[in-house]
Image: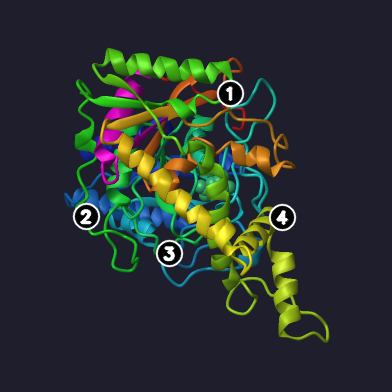
Amino acid sequence: MTDLTKLTIADARDLLKKGDITSRELTEAHIEAVEAADALNAYIAKTPEMALEMADKADAKIKAGEQTGMTGIPVGIKDLFATKGVHTQACSHILDGFKPEYESTVSQKLWDDGAVMLGKLNMDEFAMGSSNETSFYGPVKNPWRRGDTDTVPGGSSGGSVASVAGFAAMGATASDTGGSIRQPASFTGTFGFKPTYGRCSRYGMVAFASSLDQAGTITRTVRDGAIMMESIAGFDAKDSTSVDMPVPNFEAALTGDIRGMKIGIPQEYHLAGMPGEIEALWHQGIEWMKAAGAEIVDINLPHTKYALPTYYIVAPAEASSNLARYDGVRYGLRETVQGGGLVDMYEATRAAGFGDEVKRRIMIGTYVLSAGYYDAYYLKAQKVRQLIANDFKRAFEKVDAILTPTAPSAAFAPGEKSDDPIAMYLNDVFTVPASLAGLPGSSVPAGLDANGLPLGLQILGKPWDEETVFKVSGVMEEAANFTAKPTEWWR
Ligand code: GLN
């Protein structure tokens, strides 16, 4: 009997269609795998009964000839997406006990297609972090280890990548504000896809930085990413920044043909001090693209060096405003002070409810938005954000896609950067520019470092041209032929 948890979504879709397997069988195998993967701490809430009910419905749908790409496919949902009646806390203590009255559009679209929910996935608190060490529910472990030692899965979508790399979900929803889909995908040998800002609805996503937040997917293959993205993308009147554009058939973009396509290599991404292995892999990626018939073009993105400081002003500013709503009155945790008033309650609740990194962001955000500093920091950052977007616009007049490393390192050890926020923020150096510009991007597993840890390459595209990102990702996946798997030490 084949291990059903090792199938790709595309393979499972075909087997379901032929009636060789049922969603119930597939779901039962995954419920077991979720249990067996407890050591990864990827799931913070499990929903096995719901999953079986959804699987039976999916089987009926398939029998009725109504199968779509995600019908009957067991997935995990990042704890950032509101799921009706089910734990939704963005892995923060301040949302203690919160179970929403409504469903996020992204998860609803999956359920409408007949996908099956295995549970809610761990993440950095309010999606702030690059290592999944800031969750109130404890850190997530990367299925990939350095010898016998643990590594972080990246963040903030650490539970999403660990569940998919650890064969405890066929796919997972994730969100990317400054790299939270692409960087953890790179750390775990998974395929991460972040669409254009506005492609997916933010309705029902716990807000971090609203002008940057975008939903996307984690899967084991590029084709699976295309199938899952197809399900969650699309206009939604309930999100004023969602854009009314037709959703192309992403899977159809996987033609394997990039002949004559122009791929840009940004010179500013050759960072001093970047590990030689990552430079070498990038170079290898360039060679693969050439061999597939693409033309390589050197490009310049001159404002790249300002992207990190710009992001770490804009994102905390928006976060400080978004997180003002957690006051102990409306939902979640409430800490009262004996003999104290309303303000004491606010203060005690926020002091107890937010973790250190979230407090740091609120303080930075409040500072850069305050009367005396607004022009010097926030306004300046907004202007630089535009310059960064213009850099990309100019580059995309010459090229169809851009190729870079996803992250400047492989997965690091727990605790290695958690006391040094700047070192942690630096890990986002290659992902934040595209977030500031709202561009679609992916991370494709491309190789292993000397310690046997996965490394990804990032592919960026023009706004609304997800198809090219998928197409190039598919060719990269084929060339890299990344077949390595983590040893299943957690089972
Ligand atoms: N690591 C970045 C941060 O901490 C990005 C997080 C994200 O994309 N949600 O803000």
The spot of residue 394 in percent (x, y) is 31, 38
Mark 4 or mark 1: whose residue is earlier in sequence: 1
Going by the numbered disc 1, the residue's amino acid type is Ala
Task: Examine the rendering and report whether any part of residue 209 can be seen.
Answer: yes
Going by the numbered disc 4, the residue's amino acid type is Asp
Q: Which residue is mark 3?
A: 204
- Magenta segment: does it hold 218? no
Q: Are marks 4 and 2 in contact (CB under 8 Å)?
A: no
Going by the numbered disc 2, the residue's amino acid type is Met
Q: Which residue is mark 1?
A: 272
Going by the numbered disc 3, the residue's amino acid type is Gly
The spot of residue 142 in percent (x, y) is 59, 34
Residue at position x 67%, y 53% from top?
Answer: 357
Mark 4 or mark 3: whose residue is earlier in sequence: 3
Q: Which mark is residue 245?
A: 2
Q: Which residue is mark 4?
A: 356
**Residue 441 sits in quarter:** top left
Classify 67 as above or below 366: above
Distance from the alpha carbon under mark 4 to that under mark 3: 25 Å
Distance from the alpha carbon under mark 1 to that under mark 2: 40 Å
Q: Are marks 4 and 1 in contact (CB under 8 Å)?
A: no
Residue at position x 19%, y 36% from top?
Answer: 252
Span of residues in magenta: 457-481
**Residue 490 sits in quarter:** top right
Mark 4 or mark 2: whose residue is earlier in sequence: 2
